[in-house]
Amino acid sequence: MDYDVLPALALFAFVSSATPGPNNLMLMASGANYGFRRTIPHMLGISIGFLVLMLLTGVGLVRVFEIYPAIYTALTVLSIAYLLYLAWKIANAAPVKERQATGQPMTFLQAAAFQWVNPKAWAMALTGITVYVADGGAMMLFAAAVLFASVNLPSVTIWTVLGQQMARFLTNPSRLRMFNWTMAALLIASLYPVLSMIG
């Protein structure tokens, strides 16, 4: 086990976790629309869900994808379709007063399950495993997954707080609508790396 790679992995985890992607854009929108406290389950679901994804990927899913590439392709198509659906939901979110009565932010389980159809999460997990874990064994995989989750939680918290702070400027329904449409457009734009690989 080569634990010397952990500092480099920590840097990779921070950069990949803190940069814009589906998770962070949805957290920013949730922070603006629902506030920090109601978004906490969403944040925890991302961090713990990614930890599970990375562990299971490291244990055997990489090999499954190598043997049956059609499974990975099908997962990619499903991911794109689900992200387009989420973008539509964000763009058409109800005004704040209506949403407080009827709307719900993403739950812990929904956020954890979302990692399995999040192209950026797959890219992060596969890169982390193939580049930094390699043949380091089960303990190295576990250490890498825990490190990723530890770095990820503060990163997603920043995006939620940013969204919450923006809420004070989004009291006007027109500005809120523009913000939600912008977040939806950025969420769709975050699919570009996946679409370029398919093309």
Image: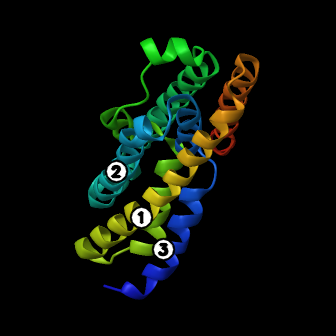
Can residue 177 be seen by looking at this rendering? yes
Q: Residue 81, relative to residue 5: is it above or below?
A: above
**Label 1 neighbourhood size at 10 Å, few (<14), some (14-19), many (20+)?**
many
Mark 2 or 1: in front is 1
Q: Residue 8, relative to residue 14: is it above or below?
A: below
Can residue 126 be seen by looking at this rendering? no
Residue depicted at x 75% and y 24%: 175
Residue situated in front as seen by the camera: 75 or 178:
178
Amino acid of disc 1: Phe
Residue 141 sits in quarter: bottom left
Q: Where is residue 179 in the image (x, y as percent from the top left)?
A: 71, 29
Q: How far apart are marks 2 and 3 (CA)?
A: 17 Å
Disc number placed over residue 156 in the picture, else none = none
Amino acid of disc 3: Leu
Residue 110 sits in quarter: top left
Query: Which comes sooner in the sequence, label 2 or label 1?
Result: 2
Q: Are marks 2 and 3 in contact (CB under 8 Å)?
A: no
Q: Are marks 2 and 1 in contact (CB under 8 Å)?
A: no
Q: Are marks 3 and 1 in contact (CB under 8 Å)?
A: yes
Disc number placed over residue 53 in the picture, else none = 2
**What residue is disc 3 on?**
9
* Scheme of colours in the image: rainbow
Q: Residue 163, relative to residue 14: is it above or below?
A: above
Query: Which comes sooner in the sequence, label 2 or label 3?
Result: 3
**What residue is disc 1 on?**
148
Q: In this view, does 59 lie to the left or right of 92?
A: left
Q: How far apart are marks 2 and 1 (CA)?
A: 11 Å
Residue depicted at x 35% and y 37%: 113
Amino acid of disc 2: Leu
